[in-house]
Image (tube, rainbow, N blue to C red):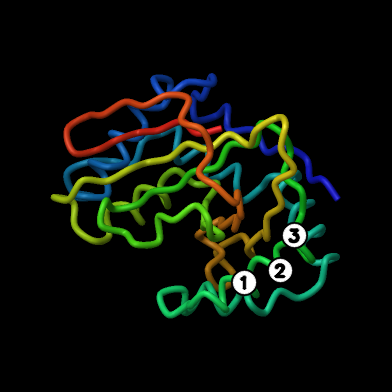
């Protein structure tokens, strides 16, 4: 089953990193000092669209139709304790219960340079929200180097994902999580470094 593409054009995205650099910088400033900075307007509008999107409602229906995903739910709570066998079970669950992502679907991921989970041979947690990606990149300390990935699902791939529960009314729903196993690090199509932040467009 292939789900429809959820468009992120509201963020100003036009296929290259430059189109969203201002947004990312604004979100980083907001996360570090929310009393001194406001969340960018385009992000607020985008988050409203996440809540009301018919496309994402269909994603949730497709997720429900594919059955329960107990390993994924365990991963959400205890990912730091996952071992090799746990990741194998998680990968099997993705292959059995996962949904094919549309070609060109854009996802976000943020990591600290010291994050041991930045291993693309295992399932990786991504999000539809750029703010959540920024949050996860900075939660270990904003003085450390971080990476923000913008991931575009390749046209020539069959990428499966387990879709998290979406919305403020469910546990982890605000994460807008999409758990994907790319099997290997996607190709770096563009890279921009600003101070301690490296932005990469992967595909």
Give the residue at mark 2. 92
**Nearer-N-terminus badge (2/3):** 2
Packing grade of label 3 (10 A; few <14, some 14-19, many >=20) is: many
Residue drawn at point x = 51 percent, y = 57 percent: 125
Residue at (61%, 55%) from the top-left corner? 181
Q: Is the C-beta separation of discs 2 and 1 under 8 Å?
A: yes
Q: Position of residue 73 (x, y in %)?
A: 60, 76
Does the residue at mark 2 contact the one at mark 3 (Cβ under 8 Å)?
Answer: no
Q: Kindly report which numbered mark, 3 or 1, lies closer to the viewer in this rendering.
A: 1
- The total of numbered circles placed on residues is 3
- The residue tagged 3 is 98
Q: Secondary structure at mark 3?
A: loop
Q: In the image, is residue 109 above or below residue 20? A: below
Residue ID for mark 1 = 88
11 shown above or below 28:
above
| Separation of marks 2 and 1 at Cα, in angstroms | 6 Å
**Residue 161 image-quadrant placement:** bottom right
x 42%, y 52%: residue: 132
Label 3 close to label 1 by CB (< 8 Å): no
Q: Position of residue 45 (x, y in %)?
A: 51, 37
Precedes in sequence: disc 3 or disc 1: 1
The picture places residue 135, in percent across and down from the top left corner, at 34, 54
> x and y percent of residue 92 in the render?
71, 68
Q: Residues within 10 Å of mark 2 (few under 14, many from 20)?
A: few
Which residue is pictured at 55% across the width and 73% down the height?
171
Kindly state the secondary structure of the residue where label 2 is placed: helix
Q: Quadrant of the C terminus?
A: top right
User: Hey, which quadrant is residue 149 in on the image?
Assistant: top left
Is 73 located above or below residue 121 in the figure? below
């Amino acid at each position: 089953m292939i789900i429809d593409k959820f468009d992120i054009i509201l963020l100003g995205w036009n296929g290259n990193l430059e189109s969203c650099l201002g947004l990312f910088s604004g979100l980083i400033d907001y996360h570090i000092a929310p009393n001194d900075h406001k969340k960018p307007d385009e992000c607020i509008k985008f988050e409203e669209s996440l809540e009301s999107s018919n496309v994402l409602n269909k994603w949730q229906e497709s997720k429900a139709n594919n059955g329960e995903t107990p390993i994924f739910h365990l991963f959400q709570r205890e990912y730091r304790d996952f071992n090799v066998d746990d990741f194998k079970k998680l990968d099997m669950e993705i292959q059995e219960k996962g949904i094919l992502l549309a070609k060109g679907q854009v996802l976000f991921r943020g990591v600290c340079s010291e994050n041991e989970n930045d291993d693309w041979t295992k399932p990786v947690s991504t999000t539809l929200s750029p703010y959540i990606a920024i949050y996860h990149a900075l939660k270990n300390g904003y003085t450390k180097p971080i990476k923000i990935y913008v991931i575009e699902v390749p046209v020539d791939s069959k990428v499966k994902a387990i879709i998290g529960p979406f919305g403020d009314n469910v546990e982890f729903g605000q994460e807008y999580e999409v758990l994907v196993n790319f099997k290997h690090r996607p190709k770096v199509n563009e890279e921009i470094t600003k101070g301690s932040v490296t932005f990469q467009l992967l595909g």
